[in-house]
Amino acid sequence: MTTTFDLDGWVARSGALDLTGIDWTEVPRHSISPSAIRTLLYMQDIESHTIVYLRSLLATRAIDDPEVSTFLACWLYEETFHGLALARFLEAAGHPVPPRPTPHGQESFAQWLEARVTALLSRAWRNFCAVHMTWGAINELTTLTGYLRLKTVAHHPVLTELLERIMRDESRHFFFYYRQAEERLRRPAAAGVARFLVDHFWGPVGSGVGPPGELEFMARYLFDGEEGRIAARKVDETIRRLPGFATVQLLETWMDRQANGGRNGHGHR
């Protein structure tokens, strides 16, 4: 029996990330590697970019679905506080978040074009939400797995506690996206188009957003080695359970391409 997502219950409980009991004065008393700091800076930047992703979605038919629009409102609120919490940790660790070279609201031509194409696709295709929910499921699961890997490799007790709280939110976000995608992809036509778009345009969270090379660095830091590859493979195997996605190649294949000098696509959170 498939477990449903209790949207009303989640909305009632949704709120800012609970930081009660986290002792920020303990942060500098434990060592943390430059690689972990660099990864956290990237993650914080992407969490703070969530509002830009939502801006693009507001021009699509996703907001016409009452469940999706309700979810997105709470999702943005929670993701915003993830970014603030990561920034607070970085400041406590002696690495405050620097000013962004390019403001979040300043789009490149490629981002501008992508947003317009997405809006046009939404207007032309009534099953657009199937793509959005699938894309969201992939990227929320990738994010959740990234946080889990960072917790494992960073070995910092305060960061571990913070990431566990963030991951509880991210797991609920993933569950909503995944159940929505599972239902919407039961239509063969929707599954076919969604699969085509993911195959040709998906890239990990933050593709085309962060500074060049940062996404690739983070992927190597978090997913290199046997344990990292197993984690990446689990992401792919989970998404392959969706209708029409049994043979999809995602995170592990993307990492192989990067190792061989390939390019990443553009992904939305």
Image (cartoon, grey):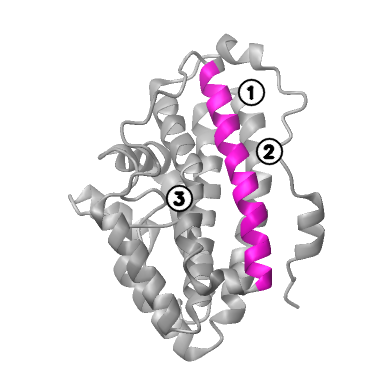
Please give the name of the residue rendered at 31% of the width and 57% of the height, measured from the top-left corner: 112
Magenta region: 66-91
Percent x, y for residue 176? 65, 64
Q: How far apart are marks 1 and 2 (CA)?
A: 11 Å
Q: Of label 1 and label 2, which has the lower sequence position?
A: 1
In this picture, is 215 found above or below 230? above
Residue at which label 3 appears = 52
User: Of residues 249 and 191, which is closer to you in this image?
Assistant: 191
Marker disc for residue 254: none
Percent x, y for residue 111? 31, 55
| Dominant secondary structure, magenta | helix
Percent x, y for residue 33? 43, 20
Which quadrant is the N terminus positioned in? bottom right
Q: Label 2: few (<14), some or many (≥20) within 10 Å?
A: some
In this picture, is 241 found above or below 77? below
Q: How far apart are marks 3 and 1 (CA)?
A: 29 Å
For the image, the number of numbered tags is 3
In this picture, is 178 found above or below 48? below
Marker disc for residue 165: 2
Please tell me whether mark 3 or mark 1 is closer to you in this view: 3
Q: Of label 3 and label 1, which has the lower sequence position?
A: 3
Query: Which SS class for mark 2?
Result: helix
Quadrant hosting residue 256:
bottom left
Q: Of label 3 and label 2, which has the lower sequence position?
A: 3
Residue at which label 1 appears = 158
In the image: residue 259, left or right of residue 95: left
Give the residue type that dot 2 points to: Arg
